[in-house]
Image: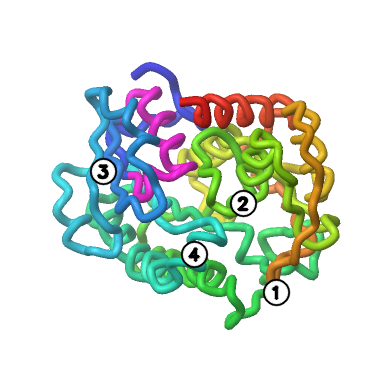
Amino acid sequence: MSESLSGGRNWRRALVTGGAGFVGSHLCGRLLDAGTEVVCLDNLATGARGNVVALEREPGFRFVHADATDPAALRGLPGRFDLVLHFACPASPADYLRLPLETLDVGSTGTRNALERAHADGARFLLASTSEVYGDPLEHPQRESYWGNVNPVGPRSVYDESKRFAEALTTAHRQVHGTDTAIVRIFNTYGPRMRTGDGRAVPTFIAQALDGVPLTVAGDGRQTRCLTYVDDTVEGVLALAASRETGPMNIGGGDEITMLELARRIIDLTGSGSRVRFVERPVDDPGRRRPDTTLARERLGWRPRTDWTTGLEHTIGWFAQAVAA
C-alpha cells in the first residue's frame, strides 16, 4: 500500500455510501491513494458521477448506482468490507427541502442497512453526522456533550432529526450487537466539487462573484460559521475511523466568521465587482456555530491545517475552471 492513512491504519476494502457526493468523493480518492479498494455506492440524487469519473480509471475503484435505503443493494455487494463509511444523505438545505422524505429515509433505513452490512462483515462503521444536530445552539462553542436546540417540526427538521436518529440508531446497534461504530459530527465544509446551486454559502457566493452579480447574504449577515477545507475534514474523518474512539466527535474549523465577512473575502479573492445584497433569512437558521474540537485534538491529534486564503483560492480556482469548461 502506498500512503498510510491517519492513525497509521490501512483498510483492505472500504464501502462509501454517498461516495459520489462532495465529501464522499474526496474520501474515496484519499482511500484509493492509500491502497484501499473502494466501492462507492450512490443513487446520484445529489451526488454526481463526474465527481468520481477520474477514480473509475483506477483498478481498485468500483461505482455502484444504487440506493442505501434498499437492503438488497448493500447485501448484494460481493466480497467483504473492513470499513463502511455512511455518507449517503442530502446535506444542503436546497436538497433536503426538495427531498424531505428521502432525507429521513436515508437517515433511518439507510443507516440501518449500512450498519447491518458492517456488522455482518465485522467492519468498522463510521456515521457522517453533522453540526446540525446542535440546531440553533444555546451553548457556544458546541461540545459533543451538548444535546442541542432543534425544532423537530421546522423546515430544517428533516435533516436535523434524520441525523439525530441516525446517531441513536448507531449507538443502539453498538450496544445490542457489538458493532464497531463511530460517529463524526462534521461542521461546515467547503472545497472543490461543491455544486453552485446547492444553496450553501461558499459555492453560492463564489458563483455570484464570478458572474459579477450581487452576493446574496441572508439577514444582516452577522450569523457565524466555522468553515473547514475538505482535505482537513477528510483527514479528521479517517483519523476517527482509524482510532478506537466511538464519538460523537466534532470535526470542524476554529476560526469563526460572519457570513457578511465571508462574502467580502470572496469578493476580494475573486477580484469581482460584485456588491452585497441582503435577503430574507431562512427559518431556524442558526445564529452562531463553532465547534469545540478539544476531543479531536487530544484523542486524534487532529486540527485543521488549511488557512482561509489557501482554501478559498483552491475552491475559487476549481469553480472558475468548472464554469469555463
Pair 1/2: label in front: 2
Tell me: residue 86, above or below residue 38.
below
Estimate the spatial distance between the alpha carbons at disc 3 and disc 1, rounded to whole Å: 36 Å
Is 137 placed left or right of 104 in the picture?
Answer: right
Pair 4/1: label in front: 4
Is 2 placed left or right of 122 in the picture?
Answer: right
Estimate the spatial distance between the alpha carbons at disc 1 and disc 2, rounded to whole Å: 21 Å
Q: Which element type, helix, strand or loop, lies under badge 4?
A: helix
Badges 4 and 1: C-beta atoms under 8 Å apart?
A: no
Q: Which element type, helix, strand or loop, lies under badge 3?
A: loop
Disc number placed over residue 200 in the picture, else none: 2
Residue 224: % across, % down: 79, 54
Badges 1 and 2: C-beta atoms under 8 Å apart?
A: no
Pair 3/1: label in front: 1
Estimate the spatial distance between the alpha carbons at disc 4 and disc 1, rounded to whole Å: 19 Å
* Residue 27: in magenta span: yes
Q: Earlier in the sequence, mark 3 or mark 1?
A: 3
The amino acid sitting under disc 3 is Phe
Badges 4 and 3: C-beta atoms under 8 Å apart?
A: no
Estimate the spatial distance between the alpha carbons at disc 4 and disc 2, rounded to whole Å: 12 Å
Tell me: residue 84, above or below residue 248.
above
Which residue is painted at 24% across and 53% down in the image?
Answer: 66
Estimate the spatial distance between the alpha carbons at disc 2 and disc 3, rounded to whole Å: 33 Å
| Residue topped by disc 1 | 149
| Residue topped by disc 4 | 96
Residue 35: % across, % down: 33, 24
Pair 4/3: label in front: 4
The amino acid sitting under disc 4 is Tyr
